[in-house]
Structure formats: C-alpha cells, structure tokens
C-alpha cells in the first residue's frame, strides 16, 4: 500500500471614434491543482459501474487528475483518482505506479495501465482514510493493466480534448503525465490557410465563387493578415491604438530592412492563426462585407 492520499481541502479620442469604451481586462484563472471527468462507465475486469445502471449506493463516478506544480505549495503529488458511490469510495494511483494512459478524445475513452499498486480509501467524516476492503471484488489485482473509463460526453465536466493542454499548462516540465499520456486521435492543427479556405467554402455571406476568389487573391496579403488582427482588437479601445501602432511599426521596419512580402507573410500568418478560429471567421465575414460594399460603391 502507498502512503494515504488525503483530500484537498471613457472618453473617446478625437479621430478614434471607431473604438469603444475600454473594458476591464479579464483575470486569468489561477492554476488548478486537479481536473475531473464525470464517467458514464468504469470497468476493471468484471467490476463494472455504468451510468444507466447506477444503484443508489454507487452514485456519481469520477476520474480525477491531480497535478503537482513546484510553484504551488498546496498542490498534491501527481496522481490519478477514481471515485464512485458519490465520492464515498476512491482508488488513488500515484503517478509512479501509472505506466500508461491512452485517450481517445472523440469518444472520451481512457485506458489506464498501472502496476497494481493503489490506495483504496473511503470517506469518513469528510476525510479520506485508508480502507482494507477491496471494493472491486478482487478485480483490481487481476486487471490493473487495463482500467477503462468512459467519459459522460453529455456532461463531462472537462472536455477530453483539453486533457493534454491542462497537463502541459498546470504541471512541471518533468511531470510523468506528459510522458505517459498517449492520444490515439490527435487532431491535425489547422493552418491559417485551412481556416481561410474553410470560411470561403462555408460562409453564408455572398457567393461562394466570389469568396473563393477573395480568399485566393486578397487574404494571402500581409496587409489583410494584419487587418484580421486589427478588426478584432479594435473592439477594445484600450488595446486598439497600441496594436495599430505595432502593426504599422512592423510594416515600416520590414520595408526598411527590405524583407520580402512573402517572408513577412510567413511570419505573420502563424501569429494570426493563434487567434481562436471563430474569431478569425468573424473577422473574415466583416472584411468580406466591407469588400462587397466597396465593390458596390465602385459600380455606382
């Protein structure tokens, strides 16, 4: 048995009327010491707890990742915990006893392989204490290398696709979680070109053929790439003027350094691509509407 794992307890400037009144910048949430998944099914050998067959004494079932970080003295050691009976029973696997975690993100299917060393605990007056009773009816000892957890995708608490990002953000660089997590359906990261082409094909504004031409001819230009950023940032008057100044400075310096437009585009495109896709699509819609208005005005 391992050591018991206890529960953690304005005014608008002249000439800048485009900008709106400043808003307070959102506070970054503190680093989390753990994250949860609500499970629809939990399997160790023949021991099965299933959402649609839960008995009253088994209750809610959860998979929890405890994340250690050297900058947070309150964080627990890296570990995995599986609870059922609404948290009354808990299995804790310290990270050194977890050999591999395989995740299929789309279906929320975890397979956890361990060396069989686990802490069995029960809740007693609000505190987890060690229990000698094997709540899995002997299945943990026989099937510790194949523990299956099925996330309740209708109410997951945490989306499975955030697992690696949470681990990378909230653990130390040397965390074993980063080494033992294997994702079977890693999503291919979209390039900005992919996002633009998707917009041209699927947007409901204007004709698809016109959007495709606009995307091919205009949206590859560096000025248009900067426009995606400025159209979004200008919603925040406190940031808009600064971003406008920075983009103009970058363009001026690149011209003085004789940086070819093609090279500058290669540098700027990945930066733009860090913006959430839905915001890029919003900016492209706005740019296309402005383009259509200009074309109509030119024809009249």
Image (spheres, rainbow, N blue to C red):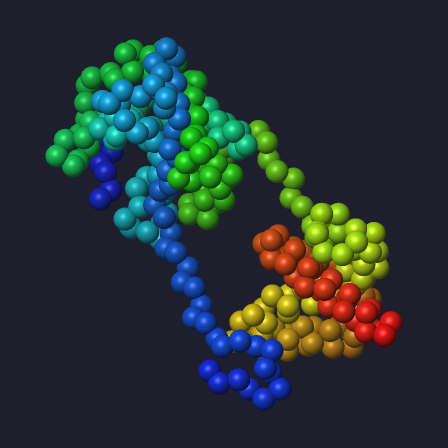
Residue 244, position in %: x, y? 64, 75
Residue 7 at x, y percent in the picture: 23, 38
Q: Residue at x 69, y 67 (%)?
A: 227
Along the viewing direction, whichever of 276 and 235 lies nearer the viewer: 235
> Above or below — where is 276 with respect to 229?
above
Q: What's the residue at 79%, 51% (across, down)? A: 208
Q: For the C terminus, give its image quadrant.
A: bottom right
Residue projecting furthest to the left: 125
* Horizontal and vertical percent position of residue 188: 65, 39
Seen in the picture, residue 18 relative to 71 is either above or below; the reply is below
Q: Is residue 106 visible?
A: yes
Closer to the camera in the image, 114 or 40: 40
Percent coordinates x, y for residue 134 in the rendering: 24, 16
Camera-side residue of 167 and 10: 10
Residue at 69% of width from left, 59% of height from top? Answer: 284
Is 21 displayed left or right of 196 in the figure? Answer: left
From this viewpoint, which residue is outermost toward the bottom? 14
């Amino acid at each position: 048995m391992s050591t018991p794992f206890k529960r953690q307890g304005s005014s608008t400037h002249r000439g800048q009327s485009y900008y709106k009144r400043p808003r307070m910048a959102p506070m970054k949430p503190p680093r989390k010491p753990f994250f949860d998944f609500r499970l629809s099914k939990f399997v160790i050998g023949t021991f099965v707890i299933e959402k649609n067959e839960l008995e009253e004494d088994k209750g809610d079932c959860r998979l929890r990742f405890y994340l250690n970080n050297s900058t947070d003295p309150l964080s627990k050691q890296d570990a995995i915990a599986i609870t059922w009976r609404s948290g009354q029973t808990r299995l804790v696997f310290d990270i050194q006893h977890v050999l591999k975690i395989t995740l299929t993100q789309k279906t929320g299917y975890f397979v956890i392989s361990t060396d069989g060393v686990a802490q069995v605990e029960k809740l007693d007056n609000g505190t987890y204490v060690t229990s000698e009773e094997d709540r899995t009816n002997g299945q943990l000892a026989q099937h510790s290398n194949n523990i299956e957890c099925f996330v309740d995708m209708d109410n997951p608490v945490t989306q499975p696709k955030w697992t690696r990002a949470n681990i990378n953000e909230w653990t130390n660089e040397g965390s074993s979680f980063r080494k033992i997590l294997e994702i079977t359906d890693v999503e291919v990261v979209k390039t900005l070109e992919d996002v633009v082409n998707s917009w041209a094909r699927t947007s409901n504004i204007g004709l698809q053929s016109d959007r495709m031409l606009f995307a091919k001819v205009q949206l590859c230009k560096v000025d248009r790439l900067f426009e995606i950023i400025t159209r979004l940032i200008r919603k925040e008057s406190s940031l808009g003027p600064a971003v406008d100044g920075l983009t103009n400075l970058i363009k001026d310096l690149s011209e003085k350094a004789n940086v070819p437009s093609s090279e500058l585009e290669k540098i700027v495109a990945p930066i733009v691509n860090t913006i959430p896709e839905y915001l890029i699509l919003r900016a492209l819609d706005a740019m296309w509407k402005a383009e259509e208005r200009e074309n109509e005005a030119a024809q009249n």
